[in-house]
Amino acid sequence: MKHLKGIVVAVALFVTATSFVNAQNKMAHINVTELMSAMPEMKAAEAELKKLEQTYGADIQSSMTSLQSKFKQYESEAPSKSDEENQKRTLELQEAQKNIQSAQQKASQELQNKQVALLGPISDKAKAAIEKVAAAQGVNYVLDSSQGSGVIVAKGTDLLALVKKELGF
């Protein structure tokens, strides 16, 4: 009987301790995607990236148009040119096509680098604000409730409004 009482007391203490530990680990959630898209810096970064993408797109499109017109010209002139001249022109067109593909890859890489350079500081600022608000609210864990982030149920404290206030918008 004493042994049974000891086990009951031990289980009761374990349950109480577990409840105490769980109470200490306060959790909250925030939709980081929504937060970042609402930040003024993000809108400016997106505009800059779009402008850069349009510039690269226009340059590449211009090169493609030039290549197509040259191809049509060479194609129409081919019967009146020698085989040697036609081979040179074919090589010239192939080289131009390679240059366009290279320019597309370079533009894609530069856009990616620019995106990292622009969005990194914005992400860091959002994270710092989230950490500050979480600390002020006594939250130990903050989950990202953005679509596809793995959070199924988000009934805890939503920090989005508080973090927006912290960031001044």
Image: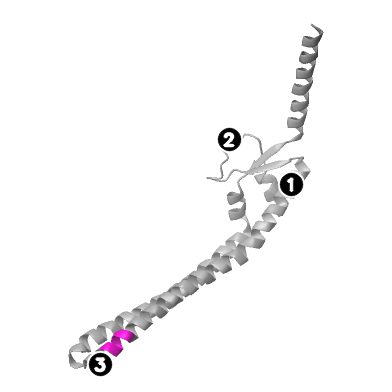
Q: For the residue marked with disc 3, what is the amino acid?
A: Glu
Q: Which mark is residue 84?
A: 3
Q: Which residue is mark 2?
A: 153
Dominant SS in magenta:
helix
Q: CA distance from mark 3 to mark 1?
A: 73 Å
Whole-percent x, y for residue 157 in the image:
67, 37
Discs 3/2, front: 3
The image shows residue 83, relative to residue 60, as above or below, that is below
Q: Which residue is mark 1?
A: 133
**Could you tell me if residue 34 is visible in this image?**
yes
* Residue under the point 79% across and 11% down: 3
Mark 3 Cα within 10 Å, few/some/many (few <14, many 20+)? few
Residue pictured at 57% horizontal, 65% vertical: 115
Measured along the vertical axis of the image, is residue 25 above or below residue 12? below
- Quadrant of the frame with the N terminus: top right
Q: CA distance from mark 3 to mark 2?
A: 71 Å
Secondary structure found at label 3: helix
How far from the left and from the top, in percent, is residue 92?
A: 34, 86
Q: Nearer the viewer, mark 2 or mark 1?
A: 2
Magenta residues (range): 87-91
Cβ atoms under marks 2 and 1 closer than 8 Å:
no
Amino acid type, callout 1: Val
Is 1 left, or right, of 95 in this rendering? right
Disc 3 to disc 2: CB gap under 8 Å: no
Give the mark nearer the N terminus: 3 vs 2: 3
146 and 78: which one is in front?
78
Label 2 amino acid? Val
| Mark 1 nearby-residue class (10 Å; few <14, some 14–19, many ≥20) | some
